Image: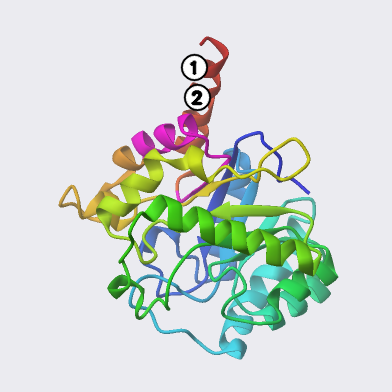
């Protein structure tokens, strides 16, 4: 669909009032349409929408609650932005199926890499949808107590190798790998992964590599380290976005599309003049 090696910007819109960064929340149809249009105008290649918060410590909502939050946004996309590319941040295959019946193609963005719903990989394959698989351990309620690794880079890489085998067996054609910054990783482990993104670039067997998505925007690995609030973390986030691109990131999942697009322009100029 759109998941090739050319770096891309994914803008974040949260439909849940429980997301960790208040600036990403759009709780009315008007807010959603305005934010979606703005992100597209600023250069977002993909818009990521989600209705079930997965921040550390969050408690999952029911399927029906998730669907009722999603439905107005899907209607807006269908009616106002039908040519746009969006991803759906959900771990439920039933939500994927309902959304597909509603609007057609999109990208699945699953924080559980199919582990939280045994039907997810088969659903993605059946509907022929691109699939973003994230590494985590436990649940949002428990994951911050599960940060034990011998070598975080090796363990995340091995996890992705195992996932790819399962996804290919299920019949999924397009796969993106997300190291899961902040999900069962402490600050040191997050920065180790960021420095070692190139080690996560796994061969797709067709002469290329599976794209890497980096989601670090305004996260605690930044704001807690600097003793600031998420609202104050844009400059530091922007600095790390450039590092992520230089280290091999293919997709930046961001709250601030304009600034990320500027970073991407700088990165492309740096690469061109190396």
Magenta residue span: 238-255
> Residue 33 in the image: x percent, y percent?
61, 59
Q: Residues within 10 Å of mark 1 (few under 14, many from 20)?
A: few
Q: Residue furthest top?
A: 273
Rate crowding at label 2 as few (under 14), some (14 to 19) or many (20 or more) other CA atoms within 10 Å.
some
SS for tag 2? helix
Tell me what residue is drawn at x 79 percent, y 71 percent: 100
Q: Is residue 253 above or below residue 169?
A: above
Image height check: is 20 above or below 97?
A: above
Place of residue 176 in the rendered image (x, y in percent of width and height, measured from the top left):
64, 52
Residue at position x 30%, y 71% in the image: 144
How far across and how far down the image is residue 37, in percent? 62, 50
Label 1 vs label 2: CA separation? 5 Å
Disc number placed over residue 267 in the picture, else none = 2
The answer to which image quadrant residue 126 occupies is: bottom right
- Residue 129: x and y in percent read 78, 62
Queried whether the magenta region covers residue 48, the answer comes back as: no
Q: Is residue 103 left or right of residue 152?
A: right
């Amino acid at each position: 669909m759109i998941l090739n090696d050319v770096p891309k910007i994914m803008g974040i819109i949260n439909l849940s009032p429980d997301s960790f960064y208040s600036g990403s929340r759009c709780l009315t149809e008007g807010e959603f349409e305005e934010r979606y249009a703005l992100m597209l105008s600023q250069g977002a290649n993909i818009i990521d929408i989600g209705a079930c918060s997965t921040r550390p410590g969050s408690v999952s909502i029911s399927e029906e609650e998730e669907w009722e939050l999603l439905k107005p946004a899907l209607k807006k996309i269908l009616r106002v932005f039908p040519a746009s590319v969006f991803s759906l941040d959900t771990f439920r295959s039933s939500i994927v199926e309902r959304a597909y019946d509603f609007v057609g193609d999109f990208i699945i963005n699953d924080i559980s890499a199919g582990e939280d719903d045994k039907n997810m990989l088969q659903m993605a394959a059946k509907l022929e949808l691109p699939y973003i698989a994230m590494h985590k351990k436990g649940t949002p309620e428990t994951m911050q107590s599960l940060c034990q690794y011998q070598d975080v880079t090796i363990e995340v890489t091995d996890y992705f190798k195992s996932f790819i085998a399962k996804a290919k067996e299920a019949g999924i054609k397009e796969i993106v790998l997300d190291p899961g910054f902040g999900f069962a990783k402490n600050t040191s482990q997050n920065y180790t992964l960021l420095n070692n993104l190139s080690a996560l670039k796994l061969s797709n067997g067709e002469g290329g590599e599976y794209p890497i998505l980096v989601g670090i925007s305004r996260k605690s690995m930044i704001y807690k380290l600097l003793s600031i609030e998420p609202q104050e973390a844009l400059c530091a986030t922007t600095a790390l976005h450039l590092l992520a691109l230089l280290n091999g990131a293919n997709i930046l999942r961001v709250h601030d599309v304009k600034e990320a697009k500027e970073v991407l322009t700088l990165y492309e100029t740096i690469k061109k003049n190396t």
